[in-house]
Image: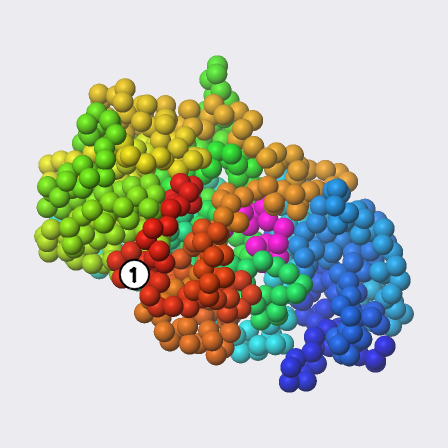
Amino acid sequence: MRERPVAHLAEDGRVHRLEEHLCGTADFAAAFAGEFGCAGWGRLAGIWHDLGKYSHEFQRYILDDGLRTDHSSAGALYAVQRLGKLGRVIAYLVAGHHAGLLDWADNTGSNLERRLTSTDLLDRVVLSEIPPNLLEQQIPAERPKPPATDLTASLWLRMLFSCLVDGDFLDTEAFFNPAPAGQRSSFPAIEELLPLFDAYMAGKQATACDTPVNRLRTEILRQSVGKAFHSPGFFSLTVPTGGGKTLSSMAFALNHARAHGKRRIIYVIPYTSIIEQTADQFRQVFGDSVVEHHSNVARQDSDEEGQRLRLASENWDAPVIVTTSVQFFESLFASRTSRCRKLHNIVNSVVILDEAQLLPPDFLNPILEALKELQKNYGTTVVICTATQPALGPHQSASFDFKGIPEITEIMDDPAKLHVKLKRTRIHKLRDLAPVSWDELAEELERQDSALCIVNRRDDARTLWEKMTKGTIHLSALMCGAHRAQKITEIKTRLSGKEPTRVISTQLVEAGVDVDFPIVYRAAAGLDSIAQAAGRCNREGLLEWGDVFVFTPPSKIPAGHLRQAAGIGMRLLAGSESDPLSMERFEAFFKEFYWMRGDRLDRENIIGLLRNDSELRFSFRTAARKFQLIDESAQAPVIVQFENDELLSLLERQGPERWLLRKLQRSVVNLPRYLHNRLLAEGAIRERYPGIFVQAHGALYHPDLGFCPDKSIVYEPDELMY
């Protein structure tokens, strides 16, 4: 072996020495793990994570282009040899730091138990040539977290794993790309954002009309700030749609962060298709301190993946993160390094769950266990935002027992009274909920000067839009985020100018989009979605009443939770002559949708796979495979051509730098996988880098409809949500 073994070799001949890399990774991992009192474990994982690179085989591979060799098992084997059963903690982290966390045992043979029997992988390492200060490590003084929930031990391991892989990424990046590495500390501290927010809100309130709705919004904001000084824990913000919930929740979070030393704010939104509006609103306040992160332009981890692509993964290092429920919760149960890398940055943060009633019932129990663990052991304050509480608090009766989250502090003094004060719409059952054809619905809409119609599927939006007169605006997720933002601005301008404005949209308009129509039509849906639609009607309370018409469309409602929710909602609506959106109605809705499901609230037995175990036998990879809020295999992203020629040119010249991929997220459309594959085979889209697909022909993007390769394409219902 050469005198000074190598960890990485740059194309220009620069050498990253192995000992330097181990110590650098250890410093990062120790600092990250120190945020939850486990710096020693982070440091030890960093020191031992690449011991396998001290083998002759690996040095030949990296210096002489030899055969690829396993370098992640040796450190795992050494940890168990040195520390006994507690060494399994380090073994999980080290063995998975490239390919992801492993199961302890499974039927494939690719598991940690089997890896730890392959002692020949440690025998290849010449221990006598490793500096003694690296090998002679002791068990860290910090003890594993005491059990607080069923997921205490497994989430602790996953948090340590996050510290290791992010430290590994950052130290490697500092070698390959020192310039971006030096820019990581350029974000302002969280307390520096509060004056920006206060100034923004002062300006907003100074120009707002003195209306009953705006006076209520001011009171909601005041109460949110006042409750921010309460002790960290779980909070709920129950505010009817249109009450300024987004900005009030941010006011709470900023003041709470300053009062209790929280490091960042993570704003979690149900759908990718509506994330841009909220992120844009926060950027108006905080500028580039906001990172918008979701599954678009995401890539799978692989040892074969190029180093620059791996370094482009997101680690949530900004003070304000806007992300999706899918990204947030799947990361909490992930095994892949790119998904887990960010987790340590959730520690000591404020997490805002917007529209929390939309959490998927099939995974509700493991989600709530993870949230309780974050709050109890990692200093995280959780804010549950919804117009339709109660949803997540404990509920018990003779027929059901929903444990939920106990001890939730409500931010509003009197949510029921607030609901009555903010009631601005009447709900009507169009044709007594008998099915309505698209032609009949188009005629109905044409009779209105201004109206919004919300449907459940993207092809429904296109079909109805094509039956409308010229000038009708179309909104769906077949339009990229930048395009949708442009159209939403046009809608707001036309409405403020009192121009006739007709809009056909999927449900992406139902959250984070502050539009105000006198009349709204909503296709059959759950009561929560109907409440969201009502929030786009008479939003400012300038009319005595706004009118919301619920109708039964000629198409099928997408299968899954949307269809279940719609069935319950329509049944409750059909039997109601009083206020269908009262808090009592929502209690009946959630009783059926959540609370009475029993064991089905953990359909895949995620808690069983990750439950506390004294022998540290966890099924990380199996749990990650089963915990999927959406079927990732059914959709694939493509970067479209929409007013982004300069960014696309930079992608061609510079490759997928992390900052560039952040900007290009606004240009992404997700397509059904079969369509994506067909267009790729035809050359209509091309894979510019592994997992990064770019539109190849300008004609594919329509100025009104968005990505539109073939208007005759027929989609499956479950591929057309949002």
Query: Where is residue 74 drawn, in percent x and y?
Result: 81, 60
Residue at x 37% of width, y 26% of height: 568
Judging depth in this view, the residue of 631 and 337 nearest the camera is: 631
Q: Residue at x 18, y 36 (%)?
A: 440
Give the image's coloring scheme. rainbow
**Residue farthest along the bottom direction in this orientation:** 12
Q: Amino acid at mark 1?
A: His
The quarter in which the N terminus is drawn is bottom right
Coordinates of residue 148 in the picture (x, y in percent): 62, 37
Residue at 59% across, 54% down: 340
Q: Which residue is mark 1?
A: 702
Q: Position of residue 623 (x, y in %)?
A: 63, 42
- Examine the structure image and report whether residue 337 is included in the region drawn in magenta: yes
* 140 vs 653: above or below: above
For this rendering, which residue is in front, 646 or 704?
704
Residue at 32% x, 53% y is 711
Quarter of the image for residue 213 reads top left
Task: Establish if 393 lies above or below 476.
Answer: above
Rendered image quadrant of residue 301 = bottom right
> Residue 108: horizontal and vertical position, in percent?
74, 45
Horizontal side, residue 521 vs residue 157: left or right: left
Residue 492 magenta-highlighted: no
Tally the marks.
1
Residue situated in front as seen by the camera: 626 or 445: 445
- Mark 1 neighbour density, 10 Å: few (under 14) some (14–19) many (20 or more): some
Q: Is residue 64 visible?
A: yes
SS at badge 1? strand
Inspect this view and state whether residue 408 appears. no
By secondary structure, the bulk of the magenta-drawn segment is best described as helix
The magenta stretch is 327-341
Q: Is residue 259 left or right of residue 375?
A: left
